[in-house]
Amino acid sequence: MTKKLLLGITIAAVFGVSIFFAPLGIVEAMGDYLDIKKAKVSSNDSKLKEAVIETFGKIPTKGAALGYAVGTTEFDPATGGTLIVATTHPGVLDSEDQKGNINSPAWHTHYVEVGAVAACGGVGVLDISHESPGKVSVDGKKIKIRDVPTGTIDTHFGLGPNSLNQFTTGDPIQAVASFELLPIFGADGLEAVCVNVVELFGIP
């Protein structure tokens, strides 16, 4: 079994039934910026040095709720797993990089724990860092995530600057994914953020 296939199986186990390998026509309908052309991940013992993801379409910088994820070794198929993500989602305020503006489309990063969420009927966000570690940049069809510390991190988790927690990110692995986000709102505001994985991309 190839390394690429093993990586795909590992991440697929985490995302469970909500994951699908989208045929080209479906990806195009959603936006070919979710169709990954190539990717490269570079890391050491203390950080994700750089993840470069290139897509077949121009990556939106406003008006969309989507993102790209780098898988880590902190995966448990039974309970979910840890990702390093770069995302944009006007309408949900969850990052210091949004400068307090809920409608900000600014691309930003998170440490994220995903798993089964009842309101989603599948996979959603269980916990998320308010801090945006490292740097992210979008240039046409390419997105770069750089200088993200890994290991045991002191960070505020939750949708806002809540209590400080220690969180183990896991080490980056050679696999990335594109995804769409679906926020679920109830009478008391945001109830859940659901994750629809569009494409997995293992790197040999």
Image (spheres, rainbow, N blue to C red):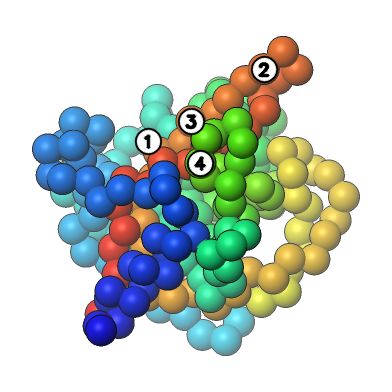
For residue 162, which numbered disc appears in the image? none
- Classed neighbour count for the residue bearing mark 4: other residues with Cα under 10 Å, few (<14), some (14–19), many (≥20): some
**x, y (%) of residue 153?**
73, 69
Picture quarter containing residue 158? Answer: top right
Could you say where residue 167 lies in the image, as x and y percent from the top left?
Answer: 73, 66
Tell me the kind of residue under disc 3.
Answer: Leu
- Kindly indicate whether the residue at mark 3 contacts the one at mark 2 (C-beta within 8 angstroms): no
Mark 1 sits on what residue? 61
Label located before the other in sequence (2 or 4)? 4
Give neighbour class at mark 1: few <14, some 14-19, many 20+ (Cα, 10 Å).
some
* Circle nearer the viewer, 2 or 4: 4
Tag in front: 3 or 4: 4
Look at 51% across and 41% down and name the residue there: 122
Q: Nearer the viewer, residue 102 or 199?
A: 199
Q: CA distance from mark 3 to mark 1?
A: 17 Å
**Quarter assignment of residue 7:** bottom left
Q: Between label 3 and label 1, give the one nearer the viewer.
A: 3
Please say whether residue 175 is visible from this viewpoint.
no
Q: Earlier in the sequence, mark 4 or mark 1?
A: 1
C-alpha distance separating marks 4 and 1: 27 Å
Which mark is on residue 122?
4
List the residue tagged with mark 2. 186
Disc nearer the start of the sequence (3/4): 4
Name the amino acid type tagged 4.
Gly
The alpha-carbon separation of the residues under discs 2 and 3 comes to 13 Å
Of tags 4 and 1, the one toward the viewer is: 4
SS type, badge 4: strand
Please name whichever residue, 12 or 159, is drawn nearer the observer in this view of the structure: 12
Q: Nearer the viewer, residue 78 or 46?
A: 78
Please, what is the three-letter code of the amino acid marked with disc 2? Gly
Residue designated by label 3:
182
Say few, some or many: other residues with alpha carbon within 10 Å of mark 2 (under 14 / 14 to 19 / 20 or more).
few
